[in-house]
Image (tube, helix red, strand yellow):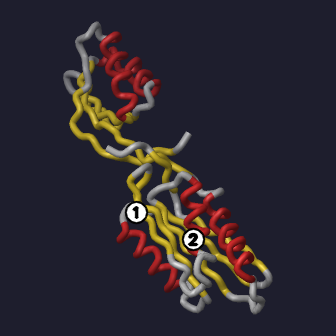
């Protein structure tokens, strides 16, 4: 399992103008290189008449990342590289960004291009909703009916979620917990049930949860 990191929750677009050149930044989550490439292809098709469609992405997070950028015909180092620097500084992983430029007739110069592409990237990075890609356990547990409300409170207290409740002789709960919170919940259940009830992990995976 990888260390938790932030990811964008939604696709977002922002536009601004610099000396009549339009810069349109579109950012989205992408959980593989193939997803990032598909997004880049879609944006290039949408803005096929643009002067440039500058793509960057970071797939993965923490210390395990794959990065990519292209200047797409802009002078070397003036577009893709500064946009990637914004992504790196954002703390986001699993993210793809395309900055589209419609040339407005006035040359911006090297410094002007770097500033414009940096600001375009910042406009989406600073406003996108974020989540955390975290390792989680899915677990099951049977409890007597009289404990249901107290268990619901403990699940909430320990940052878990009830995925399902199956009512029979007992109530079988399907639960989801960030791995970092699971031991605390197990301890709370031992205390509540005098050591008789524990949840059994049936799956471990990664899931995106809204960032606090």
- From what the image shows, is residue 178 above or below residue 55? above
Residue shown at the point (41%, 21%) measured from the top left? 154
Which image quarter is the N terminus in?
A: top left
Give residue 130's position: percent from left, percent from top: 54, 51
Q: Secondary structure at mark 2?
A: helix
- The residue that mark 2 highlights is 81
Cα distance, mark 1 to mark 2?
A: 14 Å
Camera-side residue of 201 and 155: 201
Which image quarter is the C terminus in?
A: top right
Give residue 205's position: percent from left, percent from top: 30, 45
Residue shown at the point (34%, 10%) measured from the top left? 191
- The residue that mark 1 highlights is 66
Q: Residues within 10 Å of mark 1 (few under 14, many from 20)?
A: some
- Rendered image quadrant of residue 26: bottom right
- From what the image shows, is residue 108 above or below residue 117? below
- From what the image shows, is residue 145 above or below residue 7? above
Q: Secondary structure at mark 1?
A: strand
């Amino acid at each position: 399992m990888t260390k938790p990191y932030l990811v964008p929750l939604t696709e977002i677009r922002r536009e601004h103008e610099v000396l009549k050149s339009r810069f349109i930044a579109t950012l989205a989550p992408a959980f593989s290189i193939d997803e990032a490439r598909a997004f880049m292809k879609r944006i290039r098709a949408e803005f096929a008449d643009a002067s440039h469609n500058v793509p960057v992405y970071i797939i993965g997070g923490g210390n395990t990342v794959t990065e990519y950028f292209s200047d797409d015909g802009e002078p070397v180092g003036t577009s893709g590289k500064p946009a990637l620097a914004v992504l790196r500084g954002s703390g986001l992983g699993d993210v793809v960004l395309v900055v589209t430029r419609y040339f407005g007739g006035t040359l911006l110069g090297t410094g002007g291009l770097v500033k414009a592409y940096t600001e375009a990237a910042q406009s989406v990075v600073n406003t996108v909703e974020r989540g955390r890609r975290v390792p989680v356990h899915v677990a099951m547990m049977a409890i007597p009916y009289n404990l249901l409300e107290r268990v619901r409170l403990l699940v909430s207290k320990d940052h878990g979620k009830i995925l399902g409740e199956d009512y029979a002789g007992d109530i079988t709960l399907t639960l989801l917990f960030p791995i970092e919170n699971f031991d605390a919940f197990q301890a709370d259940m031992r205390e509540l049930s005098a050591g008789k009830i524990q949840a059994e992990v049936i799956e471990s995976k990664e899931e995106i949860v809204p960032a606090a």
